[in-house]
Amino acid sequence: MRFQEKLHEYSKEEIWEEYCGFLTLTMDEFMDIQKRLLLEQMEIWASSSLGQSILKGKKPTTMDEFRAMVPLTTYEDYAPTLLSKQTKALPGEPVLWIKTTWEGGVHPIKTAPYTKGMLDTFKHNLISCMILSTSRKKFEFDISVTDHMLYALAPLPYMTGLLPLLFKDEIDVEFLPSVKDAVNMTFAERNIQGFKLGMKKGIEYFFGLGSVLYYVSQSITSMRSSSKRSSSLKDKISGISPTMMFRYMMAKRRCHMENRELLPKDLFQLKGFMCAGTDNRCYKEDLEHMWGIAPMEIFAGTEPTCIGCETWSREGVYFFPDACFYEFIPEDEMNKNIDNPDYQPRTVLWNEVVPGGIYELVLTVFKGGAFARYRAGDIFQCTGIGSKLENNAIPRFQYIDRDPRIIDIAGFTRITEKSINQAIELSRLPIEMWTAKKEYSENNRPYLHLYVELQHDHLINSAVSIRILQDQLGIYFRYLDQDYEDLKKILGIDPLKITMMKCGTFAAFEKKFGTSIRKINPDACEINDLLVCHQSNTLEIGGGLNDWI
């Protein structure tokens, strides 16, 4: 039975229990589901060629044996099998393959197989997210087959392209523009057509990457009363329904009286607002201001599918018990592993996390998934255990960022030490030393801050050097990483800032502290110490790029 049929056949309480009952599971009940599904997955995974390539002849039969015998894995462990799509080596028959960025400039893409069981679980949990996005308290939600969703999703073979297909299996929500039209449009064309259709039919749902949602929302907000934009707006709203025309005229009058710009909330009344991806905290407040409703955060990924979401309280993400088996690397263990790549960090289980603890998530995908004890590179903080608002006793989490060895900007990039080194080598710029950190602008927007020291025998004006470095490295980042190019083209963000350090600064840091600074995401204290070494350094700032350009 499709979900939209259940809306007529069952009470809201019955539907809630089916899709959102996981929220009130006890800790033991949640872990019983986790252990049962792990044992099912363990049997087929350990028997597969892929599993045996990691287990080396071992075959675990219990959860404890599984955790002891299976090492923590990364995509490198699966790449030979998955990139060549060796389906016979997998624990489950894939229905389709999804792709995403692996490591910009070094490994362009990674692929992940989805079995029927994974898709069924994904679909069920997606409906759970939809219900919770419209809820204001337990058992209350507002979903109709006449609803419309603004299309702000990347098409297949990216994971977000699955959502319209999964929704279609369950409910006849209309996407604006339609999926068959949207896949043949540019990003800008989809925005224009989606807004035009929204003005005719209304928009009840909005879902996408937080950064993309912000960009689309800004596009609507920027339609002010200048003659050029006014004409453009009239073109977009021609033929709209009388209801939407009345709403538009009232909104225009209200904005004029209040001397403010037109906001999406003046035109549309969202039932559900869902955001995914990294850096959502940078956009949530602005999105709520523009739409009049706080976006609900969903956590999903190419490898694990959809594994968690917030509720009406917006207190944190709750994990679904049936998508993956969850383990967590505590922060101190994660840092030991960063300092010593050979160190094998210990993990704790879902029922062993503590409030305030920061963890790297480790996943074993259920229902025939390929990944076991997999480090996807996502960092969470446990925001609490048990909630009075939701009347439950289970952990909830806040997404922090990617693995500190990766710089992810707005969900578009995967910048690593290797990719920066490659960009520098290809540019042939005389960069002697560097460190890179993800930082945030005054308006809380993320960017890549590169601190560089040039070779000592190249000395010219530092301002000229910075401009040339900015231009040249930007060219090579865009060449190596299409997502970096998309970040600038689609979102209008220049994600690169360069600070030139005096020659000898990095050496002074190492002499003073007995260790070199981390290449990727050094902590704030390290950056401050580096800047102190820079200020106390008497050597000139490097420059001299004329011979290199």
Image (cartoon, grey):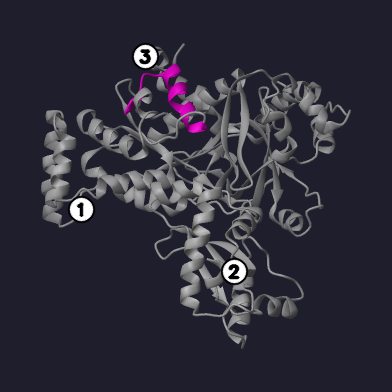
Which residue occupies 86% across, 26% down? 59
In the picture as drawn, the residue positioned furthest to the right comes out as 57
**How far across and down, in percent of the image, does residue 341 sit?**
78, 54
Tell me the residue that label 1 is attached to: 261
**In 3D space, how far apart are the residues under numbered discs 3 and 2 (Cα atoms)?**
55 Å
Q: Position of residue 288 (x, y in %)?
A: 34, 48
Q: Nearer the viewer, residue 212 or 128?
A: 212
Left or right placement of residue 460 versus residue 112 in this view: left
Q: Say whether disc 2 or disc 1 marks the residue closer to the N-terminus.
A: 1
**Span highlighted in magenta in the image:** 158-178
Q: Position of residue 146 (x, y in %)?
A: 29, 21
x%, y% of residue 498? 51, 67
Whole-number angstrom distance, CA of label 2 to CA of label 1: 38 Å
Q: Amino acid at mark 3?
A: His
- In whole angstroms, how far apart are the C-alphas of marks 3 and 1? 41 Å
Tell me the residue that label 2 is attached to. 524
| Residues marked 3 and 1 touching at CB (< 8 Å) | no
Q: What is the quadrant of residue 131 in the picture?
A: top left
- As rendered, which of 419 and 59 lies closer to the eye? 419
Return the mark for residue 8.
3
Identify which residue is drawn at 42% across, 47% down.
Answer: 211
Q: Earlier in the sequence, mark 3 or mark 1?
A: 3
Amino acid type, label 1: Glu
